[in-house]
Image: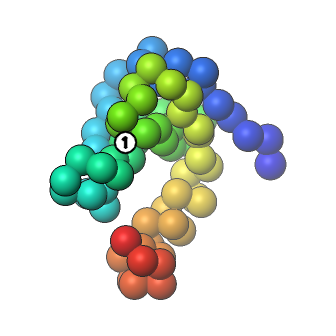
């Protein structure tokens, strides 16, 4: 698998905070829906930093594992 990185995540629009992020603002993950290459993921505390693009199937598996309790949230 080739890693895909967007050096400046602020260039993408449509970021939303993950529902699994810390409600106190300390651990916030943001994603963009509908990106053609996969699911861009960034740290909300560093909006101009990099984002990694995760294959959509891997992201779906990750979210399913969180929802089922297989991974701690």
- Residue 24, x across and y down, in percent: 19, 53
- Residue 47, x across and y down, in percent: 39, 26
Indicate whether 14 appears above or below 27: above
Q: Is residue 33 in view?
A: no
- Residue 33, x across and y down, in percent: 38, 40
Indicate whether 24 appears above or below 3: below
Question: Which residue shows up at 59% across the image and 25% down it?
Answer: 6
Instruction: Decide if residue 66 is on the left or right side of residue 26.
Output: right
Indicate whether 47 appears above or below 62: above
Instruction: Decide if residue 52 is on the left or right side of residue 60.
Output: right
Instruction: Decide if residue 13 is on the left or right side of residue 57.
Output: left
Q: Relative to the observer, which residue lies in front, 42 or 13? A: 42
Q: Residues within 10 Å of mark 1 (few under 14, many from 20)?
A: many
Quadrant location of the C terminus in the rendered image: bottom left
> Furthest residue to the top?
11
- Residue 19, x across and y down, in percent: 26, 57
Q: Relative to the observer, which residue lies in front, 9 or 12? A: 9
- Disc 1 element: strand
Question: Which residue shows up at 55% across the image and 51% down it?
Answer: 56
Residue that carries the numbered disc 1 in the rendered image: 30
Instruction: Decide if residue 5 is on the left or right side of residue 24.
Output: right
Question: Which residue shows up at 55% across the image and 28% down it?
Answer: 50
Q: Is residue 20 in view?
A: yes
> Across the whole image, how many numbered discs are drawn on residues?
1
């Amino acid at each position: 698998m080739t890693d895909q990185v967007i050096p400046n995540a602020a260039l993408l629009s449509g970021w939303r905070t993950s529902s699994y992020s810390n409600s106190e603002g300390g651990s916030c993950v943001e994603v963009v829906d509908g990106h053609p290459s996969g699911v861009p993921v960034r740290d909300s505390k560093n909006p101009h930093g990099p984002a990694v693009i995760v294959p959509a199937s891997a992201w779906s598996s990750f979210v399913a594992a969180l929802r089922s309790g297989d991974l701690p949230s």
